[in-house]
Amino acid sequence: MSAIGTATLDFGTGSNEASVEVTGQASILATSKTDAFIMADDETSDHTASDHRYLACLAGITCGTPVAATGFTIYGTSTQKLTGTYQVRWVWTDGA
């Protein structure tokens, strides 16, 4: 089993950290593998595609441990204060 999707990280008016919960994943297992990443051409109302391309230089994106039949959390952390929303893509799989 596997799934893909998008989520929005919101750093608000200025923060080093943001997180978003991915829910509604009825088939996810506690042992599933998760990943989140930034697509270079994604945009939000706050940030251009160019901003998304540079986000990888400014922020790390990681995923928390999956919760069976529920989902997982995506975390964004940065040494710089970031503002607004960024789109992230996610994927999970039960494969190796």
Image: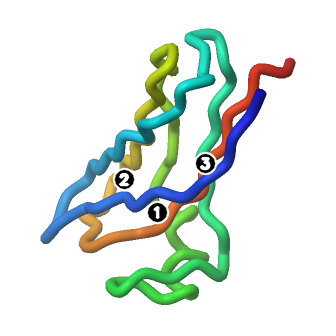
**Among the two numbered marks 1 and 2 on one chain, the one whose residue lies closer to the N terminus:** 1
Local secondary structure at mark 3: strand
Instruction: Say few, some or many: other residues with alpha carbon within 10 Å of mark 1 (under 14 / 14 to 19 / 20 or more).
Output: some
Of the pair 39 and 5, the residue shown nearer to us: 5
**Is label 3 or label 1 in front?**
3
Residue type, numbered disc 3: Trp
Q: Position of residue 46 (x, y in %)?
A: 33, 84
Of the pair 57 and 66, the residue shown nearer to us: 66
Res 90 label: 3
Are the residues flagged by discs 1 and 2 in contact, CB closer than 8 Å? yes
Q: Which residue is mark 1?
A: 58
95 on left or right of 55: right
Q: Residue at x 49, y 48 (%)?
A: 60
Q: Residue at x 57, y 62 (%)?
A: 56
Of the pair 4 and 36, the residue shown nearer to us: 4
Q: Position of residue 92 (x, y in %)?
A: 67, 34
59 on left or right of 12: right
Q: Which residue is mark 2?
A: 78
Residue type, numbered disc 1: Leu
Of the pair 91 and 75, the residue shown nearer to us: 91
33, above or below 74, in the image = above
**Among the two numbered marks 3 and 2 on one chain, the one whose residue lies closer to the N terminus:** 2
Local secondary structure at mark 1: helix
